[in-house]
Amino acid sequence: MKNNRLIVCAYHNVGYRCLSELLRQGAEIALIYTHEDSPTEEIWFLSVRELADQHGIPYLTSDISLPENIKRVRGLAPDFLFSFYYRNMIKSEVLEIPRLGALNLHGSYLPKYRGRVPVNWAVINGESETGATLHYMVEKPDAGDIVDQEKVAIAFSDSAHDVFGKVADAAVAVITRAWPLLREGAAGRIPMDLSEGNYCGGRQPADGRIDWTSSAVQIYNLIRGVTHPYPGAFTFLNGRKVIVWQAWPMDGQGQPGQIISRAPLLVGTGAGLLEIRLLQSAGAPEQTPEQFARQHIDAMTVFE
């Protein structure tokens, strides 16, 4: 089969599932670049290394842009290079090696949400849709011509984890359609208009701190955007860190951070009230509001 020799950079569920689809279609995967799992990260997703082992495909966890790997990639002479949720920036010197191009699967409907953690940002910003996009890689991140893309809806009750599952499904659908066309030289290329989108940076656990002067809806979006399996949105109570895992915005008024009611647990915000439904004090197990209130809340308690 012509134009079928690939090198794939892959990690996470999108990497596992898109790689599985390429294998289902008979792609020849010469080498996989992936990552070692971080001991500080909750590993809830599928393992690309295990998939590679199952299929007898060699893999490396060193950065593809290291000089020795650039030499190795050049020696393998791939027709295409694919990147599926690979976390390292790939240098231009690598992108120029594959004979027919280097492509990336990005977890948004580009050009919106270029950059890091696009699913989390879309939920945090209260978007009603996002998507998956296959595009050619250029030196500028998430900026090359689009080959194919698919939208997914974001329900108001969805967490980032829920949306990530939808985006992974969309990613597989895109690869299913696009790979036969790419292999045959028949895939389209749509220039990306960056002025129609935005770029987002990465997020750190510290970025999850709740600002109680924001509206109840904005705080709710932050909570569902970083809840399990991510580090969670947090606040402080009498100097102790408290993670809020589940909540819901409600009508009403109250001073930002002020606890209005213990049952249900209602907290004032900059606009509306937030009902907290699951939370966790530092060093303790997760608790219902009733359990938490008995231990930590009095009439004058304020979240900070």
Image: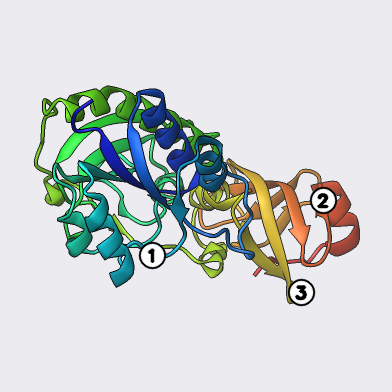
Residue 221 can be seen in this image: yes
270 up-or-down from 135: above or below: below
Measured from the top left, where is residue 132 in percent x and y?
Answer: 33, 36
Residue at the spot 26% in from the left edge and 38% down from the top edge: 5
Q: On the rendered structure, is 11 left or right of 6?
A: right
In this view, the residue farthest toward the front is: 75
Name the image quarter holding residue 179.
top left
Q: Which one is nearer the viewer's eye here, 296 or 132?
A: 132
Q: Which one is nearer the viewer's eye here, 303 or 288?
A: 288
Q: Which mark is residue 238?
A: 3
69 up-or-down from 145: above or below: below
Nearer-N-terminus badge (2/3): 3
Q: Secondary structure at mark 3?
A: loop
Q: Which residue is mark 1?
A: 63
Question: Marks 1/2: CA distance?
Answer: 41 Å
Amino acid type of the residue tagged 1 in the rendering: Asp
Count every numbered label the image shows and give the total. Answer: 3
Residue at the spot 74% in from the left edge and 53% down from the top edge: 279
Q: Which residue is mark 2?
A: 287
Residue at the spot 37% in from the left edge and 48% down from the top edge: 31
Position of the N terminus by quadrant: top left
Mark 1 touching mark 3, by CB under 8 A? Answer: no
Question: Marks 1/3: CA distance?
Answer: 44 Å
Amino acid type of the residue tagged 2 in the rendering: Gln
Q: On the rendered structure, is 157 left or right of 177?
A: right
